[in-house]
Amino acid sequence: MDIWPVQEAKARFSGLLDACVTDGPQVVKRRRTETAVQIPIEEWRRLQVAARPSLQQLLLADSARNDLLMPERGKACRRQASALR
């Protein structure tokens, strides 16, 4: 993985994209802090699919399925009661 200062990444954005496609993920640094990563679209799609459980995985999971649907206790947003006239 190569590291690009933000100014160089801005000035040579086409080169950043080319390096991403040919060499893999590229890191962009701002003020000596790693801030972003540029990755090829194929890798992004693979990561997106891997991050989401499939319906089959959800249905066959040992854990309770309602945990995914319900917010944590005390974190629910409640609607304000409308004034009756």
Image (spheres, helix red, strand yellow):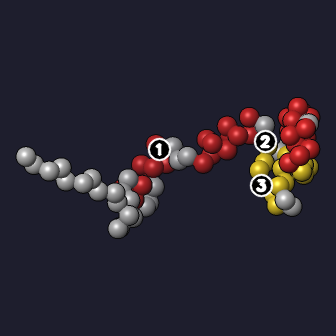
Q: Nearer the viewer, residue 52 or 36?
A: 36
Residue at 43% x, 61% y: name it: 63
- Relative to 58, is 9 on the left or the right? right
Q: Name the amino acid type tagged 3.
A: Thr
Residue at 83% x, 45% y: name it: 25
Q: Name the amino acid type tagged 2.
A: Ile
Occupied quadrant, residue 24: top right
Q: Is residue 28 above or below residue 40?
A: below
Q: Residue furthest bottom?
A: 74
Q: Secondary structure at mark 1?
A: helix
Q: Secondary structure at mark 3?
A: strand
Q: Earlier in the sequence, mark 1 or mark 3?
A: 3
Whole-angstrom CA distance, mark 2 to mark 1, is 29 Å
At which x and y percent is residue 55? 46, 43
Occupied quadrant, residue 42: top right
The residue under label 3 is 35
| Picture disc at residue 56 | 1
At which x and y percent is residue 14? 88, 31
Q: Earlier in the sequence, mark 2 or mark 1?
A: 2
The residue under label 2 is 39
